[in-house]
Amino acid sequence: MDGKAIPSFANRKNKNEKEDGRRDTDADHGVKSYRGKREDGSTWEKIVRWFGYKLHLVVDAVYELPVFFSVTKASVPDINEAHKLLEKMKEKQPALLENAETMAGDKGYDDTKFIANLWDDHGIKPVIDIRNMWKDGESTRLLGDYENITHNYKGNVYCHCPVTGKQQEMANGGFEKDRDTLKKLCPAKQYGVSCEGMADCPVAQGIRIKLEEDRRIFTPIDRASYKWETEYNKRTAVERVNSRLDVSFGFENHTIRGLDKMKVRCGLALCIMLAMALGRIKENQPEKIRSLVS
């Protein structure tokens, strides 16, 4: 799931200007920021501002094809529309939710209610990037009632040797669906690392972390696992659909004004993608299911 900025062809109408049919009175201003880290450890930030609309898109990560969408003004937050999209899919296309295994999204969808709703109501494992909401600058916190277990905001869990105090990241033990718990295992036993206090460690047999400990941090797919990274990387499927909209369907340089027209044009473009995919299947060309050219 992702939101795509689509600038309007028209400019915003000023208060003192008369209506002349060339202005876009439906659109408004949107802002989206992108952050990351460079190889040298420094951070970068890119802020994109536009006047127009936003396409909220749900894409099948395997076939890179659209399955659901909505168009709003540019100022509508991604997470607000995400809740509405879930309800609309439940009402109009429940099979989408029944067959989905995971839902990937960037930090714009980092919301406790949304994450809990995906798993509790639909059985979909959320794979959503997380923001650092710890405002006091701490890097780790004690986990539950454990005296020698800590975790960070990204879901990495650490045990501390009761003798030396040395910190080791605990091994992933998988997810227990019947208990809604993540298992974490002793790194000394799993990886063969030395730990002087293993004989006296109260968590040497491993621990279970209930998802309710923190629904944002602890999810059915462990954030500290390779599987989480693999599933999150599938999110690039929506970026490729967005690229096709810009390049093949002309949204990078369009002449569309008005919300209703934008909804129709987006809907037509996405329908054509699906029609082309269906045509490829009927012509026994499944390898070209995403191709828009001969």
Image (tube, rainbow, N blue to C red):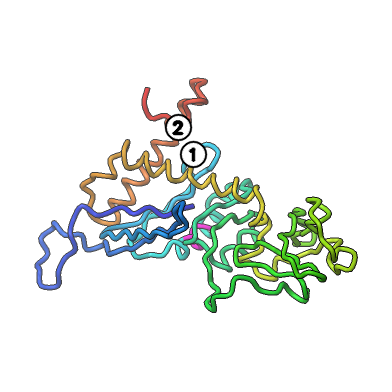
Q: Position of residue 6 (x, y in %)?
A: 31, 52
Amino acid type at mark 1: Glu
Q: Is residue 59 left or right of residue 266?
A: right
Q: Which residues are magenta?
A: 82-86
Amino acid type at mark 2: Arg
Q: Which residue is disc 2 drawn over?
A: 290
For disc 2, the neighbor class at 10 Å (few under 14, some 14 to 19, many from 20) is some
Q: Position of residue 135 (x, y in %)?
A: 52, 77
Q: Considering the whole magenta stretch, tell me its main secondary structure.
A: helix
Q: Position of residue 251 (x, y in %)?
A: 29, 44
Residue drawn at the location 19% of the way across and 63% of the way down: 12
Q: Is residue 182 left or right of residue 281?
A: right
Kindly indicate whether the residue at mark 2 contacts the one at mark 1 (C-beta within 8 angstroms): yes
For disc 1, the neighbor class at 10 Å (few under 14, some 14 to 19, many from 20) is some
- Nearest the eye: 246 or 48: 48
The circle drawn on residue 192 is: none
Dot 1 falls on a residue whose secondary structure is loop
Residue drawn at the location 54% of the way across and 66% of the way down: 111
Residue at far right of view: 199
Q: Which of the 4 quarters of the picture holds residue 189? A: bottom right
Q: Earlier in the sequence, mark 1 or mark 2?
A: 1
Q: Which of the 4 quarters of the picture holds residue 279? A: top left
